[in-house]
Image (spheres, grey):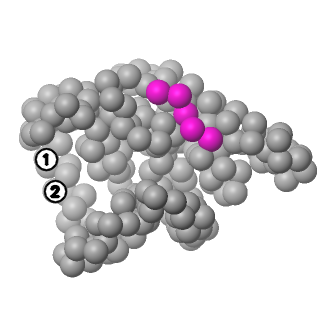
Amino acid sequence: MNLSYRLGWVFFRALFAAYFRWRVFDADRVPPTGAVILAANHASYLDPPLVGAGLNRQINYLARESLFRFPFIGWLLRSWSVVPVDRDGGGAAGLKAILDRLLAGGGIVLFPEGTRSPNGQLRPARPGIGLTVVKSNAPVVPARVFGTYEAYGRDKKVPRPRPVVVKYGRPMHFEILRAEAKECDKTRLKKIYQEIADEIMAAIAALEPRED
């Protein structure tokens, strides 16, 4: 961790411990070094820092490109190696930045659902994460957050002191589908992206808020 990231990491760990009474399960399942995709459900703005704060390594995040225009916020996001995402399009640049982070041996948090859940329930996965998995060689660690919707869901303007939990699953590898993706036609390729996304989402759904 660089100094800027470590300060943020310490801040969020203290916040989650004091205000949200957080619990972390099975963080040792996440490789301590090397490329890794952390795939989590998404119910709140709390989810990205919660997933990252549970680990003793620096993790990359995504953020709206517009946030980088603010002087201090932009500097902070760049110091944390945050990937700017254009919500109006331009997905190729975002994908390249994500793959660059993985190629450099970094970890990155992605949300298969694509956006925050409106009611806290799990939603179907979009194929975008399947594309990222096929284009990279990184293992995928499913992660599930609990309580973040109750603490700071879409319907809340101020975070509430509700307990939150993050649980990490076992690494997933997609060698067979990655190999097939190199040889198949475009129609099958799109199906592979969705198959991978669905498999990851099923692994997230299977996680329970306790130690195995």
Specify whether residue 125 is painted magenta. yes
**Are circles 1 and 2 on residues that touch, CB within 8 Å?**
yes
**What residue is pinned by disc 2?**
11
> If the image is split into quadrants, where does the C terminus sit?
top left
Tell me the kind of residue under disc 2: Phe
Which residue appears at 19% of the width and 57% of the height?
Answer: 10
Tell me the kind of residue under disc 1: Leu
In the picture shown, does residue 159 fall above or below 133?
above
Quick one: SS at disc 1? helix
In the picture shown, does residue 80 fall above or below 111?
below
In the visual, does 65 lie left or right of 44?
A: right
Residue 153 percent across, percent down from the top left = 23, 33
Residue 121 percent across, percent down from the top left = 38, 22
Please provide the residue range marked out in magenta.
123-127
Quick one: SS at disc 2? helix
**What residue is pinned by disc 1?**
15
Question: Which sits in the foreground, 206 or 150?
Answer: 150
Which residue appears at 62% of the width and 41% of the height?
Answer: 127
Query: Magenta region's main secondary structure?
Result: loop
Question: Which sits in the foreground, 109 or 125?
Answer: 125
